[in-house]
Image (tube, rainbow, N blue to C red):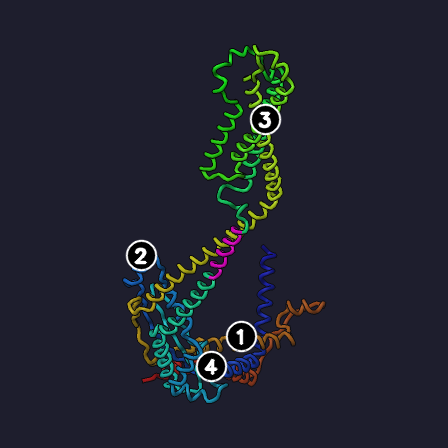
Amino acid sequence: MAVQQSSLHDIYQQVKAIAYGIWRKRWYMLGTTWLVSLLGWALVATMPYKYEASAQIFVDTETILPTIAREMGINVDLMRKVEIVRRTVVTRANLEKIIRRSDYLDQLARTDKDLDALVGQLTRDIRIFSLDEGMFRIHYSIDDDRLSDRQRAEVAKRVVANLLAFFLERNTEDGRQKSDSAIEFIDQKIQEYAQKLSDAETSVAKFQQDNIEYLGSAGSFIQRLDSAKADLRKTTSLIAEAQVTHDTLEQQIKNVPATIREARSSRSGSRGGDQDPLQERIADLEKKLDQLRVLGLKDRHPDVVNVTRQIDALKRELQDKQDALAAELQGSADAGRNSNLTTETPNRLYEQLMLQIIQTRTELQTLKQRESDQRRTVAEMEEKAKRVPEIEAQESKLKRDYISLRQQYNEFVQQKQDLDLRADVEATDEAMSLRVVEEPITPQSPSGPPRLIFFAGVFVGSLIAGIGVALVLSQLRPVVITVDQLRAHFDLPILGNVTKSMSEDENRRRSIDLLSFAGGVMLLMIIFVSLLAFDIFGAPTVG
């Protein structure tokens, strides 16, 4: 507790020393306060009064026309249009029109440099901002000291009125031009994509024509290759079966004699009416050949070729048979004359087996020819099949590009329709309703600057500056005012202190000094209060 009291005592002594040092430099403090106050108050007093005007607009977009458009699936954003107008109304062209329409501003814009500076100032001072529920406010303030208070007030009202007129025009012509430009752009894109779509269709059709064997409608190329291989395997199997049949018949015919001997009387009475079986078979095959040709089949048709080969084979066999019989008859003339009771006759079983052998051989030749053709076809298709992935990939790419172009073309067409309808709705006067809620009026009194706050701030700042100057000077040349400070500065024994006795002249000079200081302070306060009263009661009015 004793330590805390000692600390508080030390702080008190330091504060006391600082306060005494400032008091000793009070005239520096008062002079600094006067200097800063007068300079600051003069600066504030020269600040021109600011005049501002404003107008308020209500935009009603909930009309029947946008509602109908939304029900049709067309999103008509009228607030976006108003927002665009709000952002673009403060353009250089419009600001130059405002300057030329105002006599006072026109007088200030004598040169191009002055005009640029004035346009920049208007851009900074004009504000158009949106409020809640479709409300917009146009605000403008001016503090140009080249104009009088009345002129500034009139300029503020005139600028807001011109901005309101620009806003109410709703920028219809410019909006329509933008819509026309957008429609023209969409039309150009539609034409471009229509040409690209036509070129893509032509490319796909030409590619399919050039590769019709790979991209035929009767299944894919790989499926047709598999079918050709299956046909080849089937033909090979038929050849194997026909070969087995032929070999079997060859084995059977070796054990069957070509002729048999029988009693002559057994064939009498009927010989003149018999016909050779080979001739009967040849006649049947010739009838079958005539029927095939009547059906319109050509000589190269497999069935015609097969029948023709069978007829030729039978004719050769018949000729061989007749030649062999003639030779036999020639060789056995004497034996025939010696034997009139028996005779050699053809064996019907032998003839049937021989006929089956001939048919089997013909079928084998036909199947082998077919197998050769099929093997060549499969080999060619297998060689071409190596190109199938590449061709299918190219076709997929062409179709994918075509589908993409068609989608983009349809999107542009849909956008064109939506844009036409949206432009028609936005360009219609009944699309939205604009109503002026607050008309701009000429301001009767300035809205700024806040001189009361500036005067008070300057006064408080001058006091702080005066105290700061006094504190700095007192620290540059410090003095000892207590015994404790003396003990702290000198390591010498202190016997005691003696109170100073002042004479009447010193007391009188001290009193005059205090009165003078108090007078200086009071005079400064009077000036401060006078400035506040003048700003409150003496502010200019426009009437």
Which of the 4 quarters of the picture holds residue 158?
bottom left
Image mark for residue 317: 3
- Closer to the chain start, of discs 2 and 3, is 2
Distance, label 3 to label 1, CA atoms, is 145 Å
> How many C-alpha atoms fall within 10 Å of the one at disc 2: few (<14), some, or many (≥20)?
few
Residue nearest the viewer, comparing 118 with 392:
392
**Quadrant (top left/top right/bottom left/bottom right) for the C terminus:** bottom left
Distance, label 1 to label 2, CA atoms, is 69 Å
Residue 206 point in image, percent of width and height: 52, 54
Mark 2 highlights which residue? 71
Residue 408 point in image, percent of width and height: 46, 57
Which of the 4 quarters of the picture holds residue 85?
bottom left
Residue under the point 38% across and 83% down: 155
Element on which disc 2 rests: helix
- Closer to the chain start, of discs 2 and 4, is 4
Residue segment shown in magenta: 195-209
Q: Is residue 250 visible?
A: yes
Image mark for residue 464: 1
Residue under the point 72% across and 67% down: 491
How many marks on residues?
4
Looking at the picture, which amino acid does disc 1 mark? Ile
Distance, label 3 to label 4, CA atoms, is 141 Å
Residue 386 point in image, percent of width and height: 61, 44
Looking at the picture, which amino acid does disc 4 mark? Val
**Quadrant (top left/top right/bottom left/bottom right) for the N terminus:** bottom right
Above-or-below relation of 96 to 307:
below
Mark 3 or 1: in front is 3
User: Does residue 270 appear to the left or right of 130 in the view shown?
Assistant: right
- Closer to the chain start, of discs 1 and 4, is 4
Mark 4 highlights which residue? 44
Q: Is residue 363 visible?
A: no
